Each structure stands twice: as C-alpha cells, then as structure tokens.
Image (tube, rainbow, N blue to C red):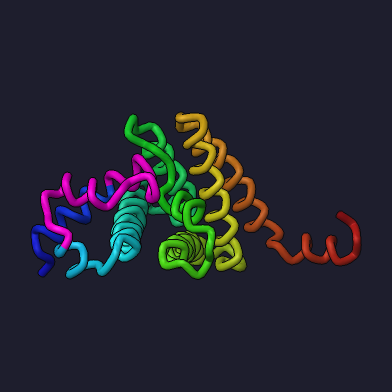
Amino acid sequence: MASPKREKLLEVARRLFETEGFHTTGIDRVLAEAGVAKMTLYNNFGSKDGLIVAVLESASNDMVARLQEAVMASSSDPYEQVLGVFDAFGIWFSDPNFCGCMFQAAVAEYPDPQSQPAKAARTHQLRVCDMFGQLCAQAELPDSESLGKMLAMIASGAMCTARQVQTREPADHARQIAEILLERAGSIGFAPAEAEIANGLV
C-alpha cells in the first residue's frame, strides 16, 4: 500500500506539472507544497524524472478509466461509444481548469525520444490507440487497429487545438471528422483508398 506522503507528493506534482510545466516547476517547490522531505522523493521515485514518469502513468490511468467510464455510460451501441469518446473530451475541454494535454507537454519539454518522460507519454498514446481500436473491433469495423490509430490522432489534434482556443469546439469538430471516418470505414474500408494511391489516382 502506497504511503500517504508518496501519494501527497504525487498529487501536488501532478497539479503543478500540469498547470505550470515540467521544467518550470522546481522540485523544491513541489516538496515544499507537498510538505515532505527530499528523502521521500528519492525513496519513492529516485529523481525528478522518476516523479514525472509516475505522474504521467497516474494521469494516463485516470484518463483512460474516465474515458472508458464515459463511453460505457453514453450508449450501449459500440459504434456510438467510439464517438462518445469525443463527447467526453468536449466535457473535459469545457472545464475552466483545462490546461492542455500533459502528455503532449511532456514530449515538447523532453524532445529526446529515449528520455523516460517521452517514453511514458508515448506509452499513453499507444493506450489511447488501443482503446479506440478495441471500440472499433466491438463495433465490427474493418481494420480496427489502423482505425484506432487514426482516431487517436484526431483526438490528439483536438487536445492540442483546445489548449489554444480554450473551448470545447475542437472536440465537436473532431467528433464530426471521426463520424465521417467511421462511415467510410464501415462502407468501403481502407483498401480502395490504398489502391487508388498506388495507381496514382489521388
């Protein structure tokens, strides 16, 4: 069982990293606001980067769980559940405390793909791809794995835009794009488009 000091440090670090950034937020400030000693950091996370990775993993677990809960509550139709993910994003973007995607921020602040924060952010993106892919498979859509990756990319773009405009509109637009993509996938799949590209028709 996690210690209360560890959980407090994780909670404070997540709030500060999310609102103010990873590099801008000094570890001494995190420790001071959490009311814990530096030894708590070293014993539980090893370093600031270790703490960042733990924050990203915790945030990923929370986001995926919230999205899955939201889509299950939105409809019993797997097709509609796929689109329900974007409705859930719309609610998130409408929150006055929304300050963008922590995972995109991690990649921006840690451009080295071999850094631990960048790897943690990439793992989260793969989880989102997998979530969409599973929903598409349940909806019996063709090539659900590829479709899941496309939907995750649409969602990622919506999150980036939402940080700039500070409204839910990007989620609504992303839902419309996703609906067009699903309709196309359901009617003709992706193979014809690949053939057209190969034949120089598009």
Residue 126 spot, x, y in % from top left: 48, 65
Q: Residue at x 17, y 70 (%)?
A: 43
Q: Quadrant of residue 173?
A: top right
Residue 162 relative to residue 27: left or right: right
Q: Residue at x 43, y 41 (%)?
A: 100
Residue 32 spot, x, y in % from top left: 16, 47
Identify whether 73 is placed above or below 161: below
Residue 138 relative to residue 198: left or right: left
Identify whether 40 is placed above or below 156: below
Q: Quadrant of residue 97?
A: top left
The answer to whether residue 8 is visible is: yes
Residue 145 spot, x, y in % from top left: 56, 68
Which secondary structure dominates the residues rendered in magenta?
A: helix
Q: Quadrant of the C terminus?
A: bottom right
Residue 95 relative to residue 191: left or right: left
Q: Report the span colored magenta.
A: 15-38
Q: Residue at x 47, y 36 (%)?
A: 163
